Image: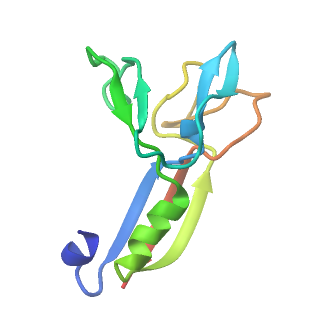
Amino acid sequence: MIAKLLAPQGRFVILEIHPALMMFDWENESLTRKYGYFHCEEGLALPPTPDYADRSYTPKAETREWQWTLADVFRSLTRAGLRVKQFEEYALCCFQPCPHMIPSGDMFRLPDGEPEIPLTFAMEATF
């Protein structure tokens, strides 16, 4: 899809939640590894929780979500003929996925004393 829509001299930029973050849940005042990193065909059945984009909305039923690895993202771009020019990982997140995360400007970070993990990543690709 990207290869069809991207102009010949265009660039594709993605800023997304890091798949490593999706392995964890906030339990007992700290991050606990709860899920695997690699993609599974059946996905994860998750209980209703507030939506990350609109915290006032909570689905009425469980959701099914799929984990994608960084390799999946790289692979989809390179197989479409794009070349990854830049890749960065950040210890900041654009929303508050865990209730005890601390505001940091207009982003959120893990609390002091919690080991840092990548929370978001950014990638730039071109033809």
Question: Quick one: 24 or 17, which is closer to the camera?
Answer: 24
The answer to whether 118 is drawn above or below residue 127 in the figure is above
Left or right, 83 with respect to 89, comes to: left
Image quarter in which the N terminus is found:
bottom left
Residue 91, quarter of the rendered image: top right
Q: Residue at image x 55%, y 24%?
A: 98
Q: Residue at image x 68%, y 26%?
A: 32
**Which residue of the protein is positioned furthest toward the right in this rendering?**
113
**Which residue of the protein is positioned furthest toward the left in this rendering?**
5
Residue 113, quarter of the rendered image: top right
The answer to whether 44 is drawn above or below residue 55 in the figure is below
In the image, residue 82 lies at what x, y percent? 39, 80
In the image, residue 39 lies at what x, y percent? 49, 49
The answer to whether 90 is drawn above or below residue 110 in the figure is below
In the image, residue 77 lies at what x, y percent? 40, 72
Q: Residue at image x 70%, y 21%?
A: 30
Image quarter in which the C terminus is found:
bottom left
Q: According to the image, what is the colour scheme of the structure?
A: rainbow
